[in-house]
Amino acid sequence: MKKKALISVKTIQNIDGEKEVVELITEGEYYKSGSQYIAEYDETEISGMEGTRTTLKMEKDRVSIVRRGTTNSDIEFKKGQTTVSLYSTPFGVLNIMIKPTLVKVDVDENGGKVKLEYKVNTNDTGYIDNLLELNIKTSEGQN
């Protein structure tokens, strides 16, 4: 059963010693499907992806971020596993490589937290360190 949820997404990029922080708090939906917990929300102008629906699929040691709309991508985070995917935006398509160093998933039927530390390489421009923290609170959960 889908539940309304408050979803907080915080990303920190470390580019040449400079930290860029983006934080988004939005309403969305949260539910379980098979062995995965799913959180869905609509991106806003703040994220630069207005018109895009983001789906987060969370398992014990794996997180997938699927975006459909003005931005299209399928990105998977599994510790120790490098993934390559296409990131399609209104401005063009990027080839991105993700190297996760930490994939911590602590979620249950009432929400929870996810922490991802990873390096990303876009179109062979060199790796950038990233941190993504996700916090999901359903009306029943007190996370």
Image (cartoon, rainbow, N blue to C red):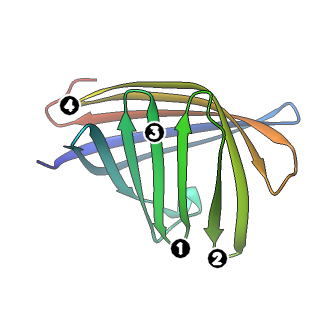
Q: CA distance from mark 4 to mark 1?
A: 30 Å
Of callouts 2 and 3, the N-terminal one: 3
Of callouts 2 and 4, the N-terminal one: 2
Secondary structure at badge 2 equals loop
Above/below status of 7 relative to 46: above
Above/below status of 116 relative to 1: above
Q: Quadrant of the C terminus?
A: top left
Of callouts 1 and 2, the N-terminal one: 1
Q: Would you name the residue on which mark 1 appears?
A: 70
Residue 109 is left or right of residue 54, and the answer is left
Q: Would you name the residue on which mark 2 appears?
A: 90
Q: Name the amino acid, label 4.
A: Asn
- Looking at the picture, how far across and down is residue 37, in whole percent? 28, 39
- Looking at the picture, how far across and down is residue 50, in whole percent? 50, 68
Q: Name the amino acid, label 1.
A: Thr
Residue 71 is left or right of residue 121, and the answer is left
> Based on the displayed image, in which of its 4 quarters is residue 8 positioned?
top left
Marks 3 and 4 close (CB-CB < 8 Å):
no
Of callouts 3 and 1, the N-terminal one: 3
Badge 3 local density, few (<14 within 10 Å), some, or many (20+)? many
Q: Would you name the residue on which mark 4 appears?
A: 110
Q: Write the residue at 16% across / 37% down.
A: 139
Viewer-side label of 3, 4: 3
Front-most of residues 22 and 30: 30
Residue 6 is left or right of residue 127, and the answer is left
Badge 2 local density, few (<14 within 10 Å), some, or many (20+)? few
Q: Would you name the residue on which mark 3 appears?
A: 63
